[in-house]
Amino acid sequence: MSEPLPERAVRDRRARVRAAAAADPRVPADVVRVLAGDPSPVVRRALAGRREDLPDVFALLAWDADAQTREAVAGNPFCPPGVLASLVDDPVDLVRWEIPRADLDAAVVSAIVGSPDVTLRRLMAETANPEAQRRLAADDSAAVRGGAALTTRDEPLLARLVGDPSAEVRSRAAQNPHLVPAQRHALANDRSASVRRSLIQAGGVDPDDFDALAGDRSADVRWWLAAVPESPAHILRRLTTDADDEVAGQARAMLRGGGRR
């Protein structure tokens, strides 16, 4: 008696057929489990990306010699917390960087917070995980704190990051869509030109702050004011007579409807 189709597929000599079976949700989990030890990394990668509760399979594949297989495990939303926590220490950065997401278990968040990988911590800070953002907002790295500043919805936390000593952090905060008017005003008057420019680039300038920015001491800030669609016509007309030729030319181009030069 011949084997049913799923059994035949997982034992097919062609790797592409076995990989298709590994990814096919119609193939029962107990059938595809045998593919965790498949000699082809293409098959194991397909299995690692399967959207199904296969804790024993993911635990095995998290130690796979193929980095792309481990990367697929790390990015799989069905991967168990314990397995994800082990991958925080993976030797390959692309594997580690697949882990951060908003719904992570507290133990995985703690492992990431304690990781020496700055990029991993920054990526975690950029998620909408409130506990991770609260902890990483105190990180030693400005890049990590900036990740939290960019996306947090926590009002007290955002207020703290708007006043961070690092211009890099304040520049990321300037791009946060949840700023309140007082915060946008403070950033429009920030001592760092990079922060003022970031606010303009994000379209976060309040009507009362356009005039001051049109007279900003930084030509770069004025150029960006002349380049964004949020700038009103009277500000653009003022900038057409700017002392900096690049600023004046950009303002004229915007008034003509030509966009950025």
Image (cartoon, helix red, strand yellow):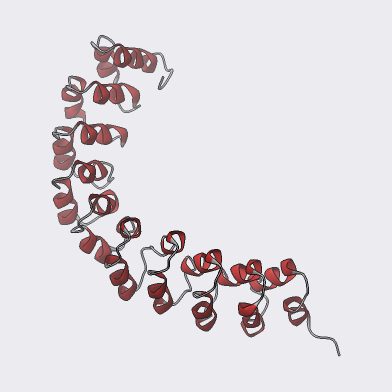
Pinpoint residue 10: horizontal percent, then vertical percent: 72, 77
Residue that appears at 23% across and 50% down:
142
Front-most of residues 122 and 251: 122
Q: Quadrant of residue 96?
A: bottom left
Furthest residue in direction right, as rendered: 1
Q: Quadrant of residue 86?
A: bottom left
Front-most of residues 229 and 2: 2
Pinpoint residue 213: horizontal percent, then vertical percent: 19, 25
Front-most of residues 212 and 3: 3
Q: Work out whether 218 lies above or below 77.
A: above
Q: Work out whether 142 lies above or below 222.
A: below
Q: Quadrant of residue 12?
A: bottom right
Q: Work out whether 32 lies above or below 94.
A: below
Furthest residue in direction bottom, as rendered: 1
Residue that appears at 31% across and 57% down:
118
Pinpoint residue 98: horizontal percent, then vertical percent: 44, 62
Front-most of residues 226 and 58: 58
140 relative to 261 in the view: left or right: left
- Quarter of the image that includes the N terminus: bottom right
Residue that appears at 66% across and 76% down:
38
